[in-house]
Amino acid sequence: MLSFVSVGLLGLLSLSIPVGIVLFLLGFGIDQFFSAFPLTRGLGSMVWSTSENAALIAIPFFVLLGEILVRTGIAARTYSALDRWVSWLPGGLVHANVATATMFSATSGSSVATAATVATVAMPQADRLGYDQKLFSGAIAAGGTLGIMIPPSINLIVYGFLTQTSIPQLFLAGLLPGILLAMAFLAVTALVCLVNPKLGGARRTFPLREMALGLADLLPIILLFSAIIGSIYKGWATPTEAASVGVAGAMAIAALFGGLNTRMIGEALIGTVRVTAMIMLVVIGASFLNFTLSAAGLSQELRGFLEGLGFGPLQTLLVIVAMYIVLGFFIETLSLMVITIPIVVPIVISLGYDPVWFGILMIVLIEMALITPPVGLNLFVVQSARRGGSIAEVMLGAIPYVLAMLAMVAALIALPQIALYLPMAMR
């Protein structure tokens, strides 16, 4: 059965069949060949019970929040403000790419949306100031990955839903690793540009008055993040309710900056429907596949395989990490999560690991998949915003940041408290 799922998954994806449809087809195949019971008779109930879960309502709200911020010019203001504060570092404006991506990650919940937003604003600056395209574009692609780590994160919501793990706890657990990873990206950028100054640009300084005035453009994003996360941890709102608060705040910010109009609202709503429909098809397909896998006994089969290797908990975990790195080369990130969670998470929990901690470890591995070829989505998003050059340049520029992510994986395994400190403190 394990071979059937692996070969079937890669084979169907190679035919460019939509991921959600692939998940349903695999579920039907498992029902047909490996189950003694007619599992498809539970399809209607499975689709309905998945769709009506209140936790998933947060997804369209967070998508809409990101769409509003992208379409109202707030990204350009944020980028300009951060340019004044970080361009004195070795690498110059490259640091603004990472810093802006970090700020938008705290509101958008999506890595692809974050990368697209920053790339649209930043790439013209690279052309104008003569920056090396490799590191500049690689920094945008890597910074965009923070969108699924720093809360609110759509991927963490999906993980919490599929594993029945507390979403507020996951949000807290992702905050410190997300900030540390952003700082690691800044440090890697500075180190690379110190070794080879040609990869960066001119280090620029601005008068203190200009830097102080720039803080006014950062204030809306900071207030929005505080409203979303603060309302959750003060107990005033659930993640779903906090998402709606975020949308209301984004609308108020758009009105304040003069970007609120019927055309913007229409475009944001259409974009939200498209993204949400794609996510929900994948989630529902994953729920059906999870149901058939569990009923057919794949989890027990995989657990027996891992136990047969004779490895201890740490060695087994390292095998799982290696599996995610390899699969991340070929499978889109959300799909990789929903396909593997029902199989891997029960095994990880049986080994004695915390599901909240493993969720953050998985997110770092998923982030890595976003900037590793051949299927790294952020690489293609950034390339689409460039006026020339090949995608190989973006791939090369992302390599230092992949190494930083590997270091974060090692740090999380060696020091689980990096992820668990805030959740435990809040308890």
Image (cartoon, grey):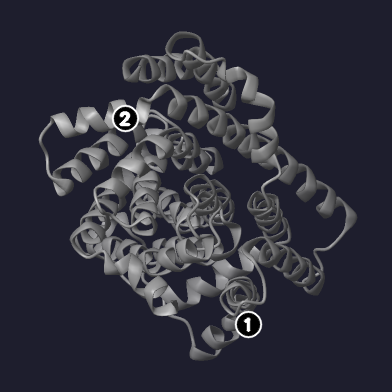
Which percent across, then down, holds residue 343?
37, 35
Is the residue under label 2 in contact with that under label 1 (CB below 8 Å)? no
Please tell me whether residue 149 is drawn above or below residue 45 in the rendered image: below
Name, please, the residue furthest toward the bottom. 209
Query: Residue sitting at 39 percent across and 48 percent down?
Result: 367
Query: Residue sitting at 60 percent across and 18 percent down?
Result: 40
Which percent across, then down, holds residue 43?
64, 24
User: Mark 1: few, some, or many residues within 10 Å (few <14, many ≥20)?
Assistant: few
Q: Earlier in the sequence, mark 1 or mark 2?
A: 1
Query: Residue sitting at 67 percent across and 77 percent down?
Result: 236
Q: Is residue 13 visible?
A: yes
Quarter of the picture containing the C terminus is: bottom left
Distance from disc 1 to disc 2, alpha carbons, whole Å, reads 56 Å
- Mark 1 residue type: Ala
- Mark 2 residue type: Gln
Please tell me whether residue 405 is drawn above or below residue 6 in the rendered image: below
Q: Which mark is residue 142?
A: none
Which percent across, then down, holds residue 370?
42, 42
> Which of the two discs, 1 and 2, sits closer to the camera?
2
Name the residue that disc number 1 marks.
Answer: 216
Name the residue that disc number 2 marks.
Answer: 300
Q: Is residue 183 visible?
A: no
